[in-house]
Image (tube, rainbow, N blue to C red):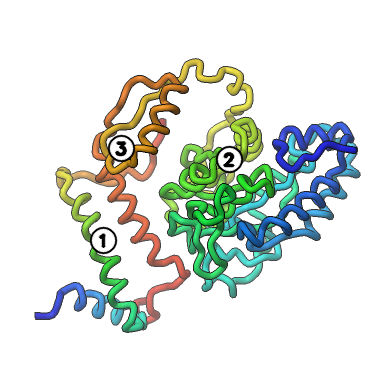
Amino acid sequence: MADPLDDFIASAAAALQLPLEPEWQGAIKANLEVTLKHARLVAEFPLPDEAEPAPIYKA
Amino acid sequence: MSRDLAWATSAEIAQAVASGASSALKIVDDCLARIEARNPALNAFTAITADRARAKARLIDAAPDKAKLPLAGVPFAVKNLFDIECLSTVAGSKINRTRPKAERDSPLIERLEAAGAVLVGALNMGEYAYDFTGENVHDGPSRNPHDTGCMTGGSSGGPGGAVAGGMVPLAFGSDTNGSIRVPSSLCGVFGLKPTYGRLSRARSFPFVASLDHLGPFARTTRDLALSYDLMQGFDAEDAACAERPVEPTMPELKRGLDGLRIAVAGGYFQKGAFPEAIEALARVAKAAGARDEVEIPEAARACAAAYVMCAQHGHRLGGGSPPASWS
C-alpha cells in the first residue's frame, strides 16, 4: 500500500499546480512529518468546541 | 590625532561628532574601511551603500544643529529584509533578487537617519528568516567573529557578526522565533526583541506576521535603549503597530535592576542543555539575583504551535498566489 503522505504531497502539489522535482520528495516528506508531529502535540490540547482565536491582545 | 572609534559605542560616536572632535565623514570612511577589511572573513554584509553613506555624512557635518542629533554620524546596517531605497529587498532569498527596487526606506531607517545615524549597508540572513544558523545558501554563511569556524546563529546572522566584529556599533534585525536572540547570544552582543507591536514593521519583508518583531543589536544595553527610543512611535502602515505613547527607556537605565523580578525558566527550557550552558545560566542568574525557578505552563506545546505557524506562513514566502483556476 502506498504511503498516504506520498499521496497527499502528490495530490496537494497537483491541486496547487506546483511542479515538484522528484529528488526533493524525501525532504518534503521529512518536513511534513516533523510539522505533523508538532501539529499533533498542539491538537492534543483539550479545548472546548466554542473556543475562538484571540487575535488582539491588550495589557 | 583623534581617538580610534572602531569599538566606540553609538553614544560616544555621536558625542565626538557633536563636539567636533571628529567629522561624520571620517567616522563613516573609517567604518567603510573596516567593513572592506573584515567582511571577506565574516560575510556579514551583502550590500554596502558607500556613496549614500558618504553623502549623508557630509550633510550631517554641514548641519547647524548636529549637536542636537542623538545619533550624529553613527554608522548602522540592517538585515536585508528591511527596504532600502534603490535596492531590491532580498530577505536572503534567491527568488526576491528580481523584485523591483524599493522606492522608500523602511520607517525605522528613516527614524534613525532623522536622528543623525548613517546607513552603511544591508546584512546577511538565513533565507526568508526561516533559519537558526545565519548560514545563507546563496550569499554564503555569516561567520562568528569570535571564531570564524563557528556560525553566528540566525536568522539575523549578519547583524550579530557586524556588531561583534567591530564593523558597526548598531545593527537591526528581526525576530520571529529567536532570530535576534539566537545570534546576539552566539556572537556575545546585546539584542532586543521588543514587545510585539511597539516598532513598525512597515516596508520590511515579513515571515510570520503575527510573530514578527524588528529590533536592534549593539555592544551595550545603553545603545539598545538609545536606538529603541528613537524608533518608537505609532505607524499606521503596520496594522499591528500599537497606538501607545512613546515610553522612553533611557531614563530607566539608571535604575539598574531596581524593581525588576527575575527568575530562571525551568523544565522545558533546561531540557537537553549542556553542562556548560547550565553553568553559564547559573552565573547570570547569580549576577541578576534570580533565586526562584518558574515553570511556564505548556511551553513545549507553545513552541510546537510556533513551529506549525512558521511552516504555515512560510509556504507563501515566494510571493506565490493560488492557481488562476481557483478564482
Q: Is residue A51 above or below residue B284?
A: below
Q: Is residue B50 above or below residue B255?
A: below
Image location (x, y in percent) of residue B74: 74, 42
Badge 1 amino acid:
Val
Ranked by sequence position, the earlier of labels 3 and 2 is 2
- Decide if residue A38 is in sight here: yes
> Which mark, residue B234?
2
> Which mark, residue B294?
none
Q: Quadrant of residue B313?
A: bottom left
Image location (x, y in percent) of residue B314: 40, 62
**Chain at numbered mark 1:** A
Same chain, marks 3 and 1? no
Report helix, strand or loop for mark 3: helix
Q: Are marks 1 and 2 in contact (CB under 8 Å)?
A: no
Report helix, strand or loop for mark 1: helix
Q: Circle 1 is placed at which residue position?
A: A34
- Decide if residue B239 is in sight here: no
- Is B179 on the left or on the right of B115, as rendered? left
Q: Are marks 3 and 1 in contact (CB under 8 Å)?
A: no
Q: Quadrant of residue B307?
A: bottom left
Q: Is residue B103 above or below residue B58?
A: below
Q: Residue at x 82, y 52 (%)?
A: B29
Q: Residues within 10 Å of mark 2 (few under 14, many from 20)?
A: some
- Is B232 on the left or on the right of A44, as rendered? right
**Image depth: mark 3 or mark 1 in front:** 3
Query: In whole angstroms, how far apart are the C-alphas of marks 3 and 1?
Result: 22 Å
Q: Circle 3 is placed at which residue position?
A: B270
User: Considering depth in this image, is B257 or B117 the residue closer to the camera?
Assistant: B257
